[in-house]
Image (cartoon, rainbow, N blue to C red):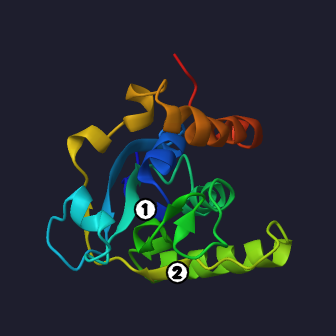
Amino acid sequence: MSRLETATLAGGCFWCTEAVFQRLRGVTSVVSGYAASQVPNPSYQAVCSGRTGAAEAIQVTYDPDVISYDTLLDVFWHLHDPTTLNRQGNDVGTQYRSSIFYQNEDERKVAEASKAALDKSGAYKHPAVTEIVPFTNFYSAEQYHQNYYNDNRSQGYCAMIIDPKIKKLLKNYQSELKVEA
């Protein structure tokens, strides 16, 4: 196994992005949490208040020999709406912003090129407003937020909001999915 790498992405509610990225081959772990917080170790309530500057985000640990950073970004672009500022659907606030937190210059270049290609593709009516910014910090969210979809599939939010994202993933990224044992 090669050296594992980490990607930090924010695309609205972390329950949604966590559920999607957990299903990708080469992904060894996904942690829901808060990125770019101005307050150390913020709580969910503090983040929801909008006073921490944090975004709901996921930290994805992956094997770059199995799945590339570019592929992770392709999934990211197509499984949330990167054209809406500080919102995803009915989830509104800066904590729901679309962000890529790059770890190094190579990641920044890949992210910028990927965003430009997305805008050029016409996949969305409007250009992406996703911020591409240096990684500063990431704090794990409370335990009840971890593995949320897998533990709460019958909950209304999961059925209404996350299930369609999973179905889209299954349809459009078949070759990138983990093989279920």
Residue 120 in the figure: left or right of residue 145: right
Mark 1 element type: strand
Q: Judge whether residue 62 can be spotted in this image.
A: no
x, y (%) of residue 167?
Answer: 69, 35
Q: Is residue 176 visible?
A: yes
For the point 76% across and 43% down, the residue is 172
Residue type beneath disc 1: Ala
| Marker disc for residue 7 | 1
> What is the x, y in percent for residue 61?
38, 51
Which residue in the rendered view is the most extreme toward the right? 122
User: Is residue 82 rendered to the left or right of residue 15?
Assistant: right
The amino acid beneath tag 2 is Glu
State the residue at coordinates (44%, 46%): 15
Residue at image x 71%, y 41%?
168
For discs 1 and 2, the disc positioned in front in the rendered view: 2
Going from the N terminus, do you reach mark 1 or mark 2 first?
A: 1
**Are dots 1 and 2 in contact, CB under 8 Å?**
no
Q: Quadrant of residue 116?
A: bottom right
What residue sits 41% from the left and 28% below the top?
Answer: 152
Q: For residue 114, what is the image quadrant?
A: bottom right
Expressed as whole percent of the image width and height from the top left, the position of residue 28 reads: 40, 41
The disc at residue 124 is none
Which residue is under mark 2?
131
Comparing 143 with 91, the one in front is 91
Q: How many marks?
A: 2
Residue nearer the viewer, 128 or 120: 128
Q: Quadrant of the N terminus?
A: top left
> Could you tell me residue 151's position as x and y percent?
38, 27
Q: Residues within 10 Å of mark 2 (few under 14, many from 20)?
A: some
